[in-house]
């Protein structure tokens, strides 16, 4: 697809609780018909890198965990962890904003909140992060290409706030273009933030095709889902699409219902990005097939506050990452 122009618009709704970060040190530990080929190798080692978010049962982020707490399973087969890090490292981040006609009703709430919160996320994130912004409706428009310049982001967001939603919705094509741009970056930490009702009516590509393309990409998707099921009969379908895309990629979706909830959603995304684990594995086989991944994390033990001599309490942890990977076939000798 080709580069684009400048336009924008949209609306939202989210249910979410406040974020608390659990530090392990405190708790006792120190347009095509073919999709791109699977990206499962990093140099000669063919290492696969995964961004992993860890939370407890209350949704609090668990930070500073050690490598030996993690087990990575390919189906039922444990895989060796070849590399491991948790730090506030640079990301490549794309913002994909729906400015099609379906966003017209929620334009004022959406674009005021989006303008404020995108800028807040950028200014509070790692200075070495790079960003692009893409709008779509009636076609994808590249509003801002890769940059680390906050002033460029400010000007782009001002234009976005003035835009009037219009036209059809090529959601799947826009997602494909955004994922393709992220795939071209060498940075292993890549995030795509969607602001949309996910109701496509004008794409050349189908959703199953887009889903396969996403499965072959190492990108985490966060989505601000803007449709209101009380007034939009197609909201349920869009929500299913968003839930699957975020689940496949190891991300999260939010359904806000006002400025405060939109702010909470962006705050959580920023917190997760600063405390995600980057885990590398070397697949056991390279057969070109889909391999489901599951990551288990050992619980954390904390002192029982009810009194001395009590057995320590365990905080159960869960890990969220991409659902799996295609093990690209080794090249012939």
Image (spheres, rainbow, N blue to C red):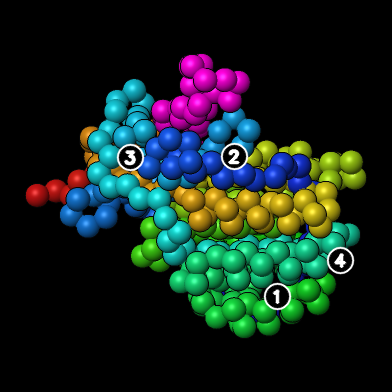
Front-most of residues 31 and 278 = 278
Circles 1 and 3 in contact, beta carbons < 8 Å = no
Q: Residue at x 50, y 26 (%)?
A: 303
In the rendered structure, which disc, 2 or 3, sits on the residue that comes first in sequence?
A: 2
Secondary structure at badge 3 equals helix
Mark 1 → mark 3, Cα distance in angstroms: 40 Å
In the rendered structure, which disc, 2 or 1, sits on the residue that comes first in sequence?
A: 2
In the rendered structure, which disc, 4 or 1, sits on the residue that comes first in sequence?
A: 4
Residue 141 placement: quadrant: bottom right
In the rendered structure, which disc, 2 or 4, sits on the residue that comes first in sequence?
A: 2
Q: Is residue 103 above or below residue 244?
A: below
Circles 2 and 3 in contact, beta carbons < 8 Å = no
Q: Nearer the viewer, mark 2 or mark 4?
A: 2
Front-most of residues 277 and 65 = 65
Mark 4 → mark 1, Cα distance in angstroms: 13 Å
Secondary structure at badge 4 equals helix
Q: Residue at x 51, y 16 (%)?
A: 310
Would residue 62 be found to the left or right of residue 101 on screen? left
Mark 1 packing: few (<14 Cα in 10 Å), some, or many (20+)? Answer: many
Task: Please report the bounds of the magenta region as a residue range.
Answer: 296-322
User: Which residue carries the number 2 mark?
Assistant: 60
User: Which residue carries the number 1 mark?
Assistant: 157
Residue 94 placement: quadrant: bottom right
Q: Is residue 316 magenta?
A: yes
Percent coordinates x, y for residue 21 in the rendering: 56, 45
Disc number for residue 67: 3
Front-most of residues 277 and 243 = 277
In the rendered structure, which disc, 4 or 3, sits on the residue that comes first in sequence?
A: 3
Circles 4 and 3 in contact, beta carbons < 8 Å = no
User: Which residue carries the number 4 mark?
Assistant: 108
Mark 2 → mark 4, Cα distance in angstroms: 32 Å
Q: Is residue 175 magenta?
A: no
């Amino acid at each position: 697809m080709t580069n684009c122009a400048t336009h924008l618009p949209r609306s939202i709704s989210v249910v979410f609780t406040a974020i608390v970060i659990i530090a392990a040190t405190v708790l006792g530990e120190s347009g095509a018909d073919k999709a791109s080929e699977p990206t499962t190798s990093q140099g000669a080692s063919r290492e696969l890198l995964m961004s992993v978010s860890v939370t407890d049962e209350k949704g609090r982020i668990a930070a500073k965990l050690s490598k030996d707490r993690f087990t990575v399973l390919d189906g039922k087969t444990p895989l060796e962890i070849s590399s491991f890090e948790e730090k506030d490292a640079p990301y490549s981040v794309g913002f994909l904003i729906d400015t099609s006609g379906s966003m017209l009703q929620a334009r004022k709430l959406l674009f005021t909140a989006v303008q404020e919160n995108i800028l807040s996320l950028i200014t509070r994130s790692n200075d070495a992060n790079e960003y692009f912004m893409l709008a779509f409706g009636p076609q994808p428009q590249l509003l801002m290409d890769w940059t680390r310049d906050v002033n460029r982001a400010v000007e782009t967001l001002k234009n976005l706030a003035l835009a009037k939603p219009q036209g059809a919705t090529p959601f799947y094509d826009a997602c494909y273009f955004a994922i393709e741009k992220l795939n071209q970056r060498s940075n292993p930490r890549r995030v795509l933030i969607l602001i949309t009702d996910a109701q496509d009516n004008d794409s050349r590509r189908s959703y199953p095709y887009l889903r396969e393309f996403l499965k072959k990409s190492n990108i985490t998707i966060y989505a601000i889902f803007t449709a209101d099921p009380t007034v939009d009969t197609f909201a349920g379908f869009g929500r299913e699409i968003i839930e699957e895309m975020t689940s496949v990629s190891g991300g999260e979706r939010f359904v806000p219902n006002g400025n405060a909830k939109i702010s909470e959603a962006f705050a959580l995304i920023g917190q997760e990005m600063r405390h995600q684990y980057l885990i590398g594995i070397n697949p056991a086989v390279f057969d070109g097939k889909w391999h489901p991944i599951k990551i288990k994390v050992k619980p954390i033990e904390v002192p029982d506050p009810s009194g001395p001599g009590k057995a320590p309490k365990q905080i159960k942890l869960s890990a969220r990452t991409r659902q799996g990977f295609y093990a690209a076939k080794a090249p012939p000798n």
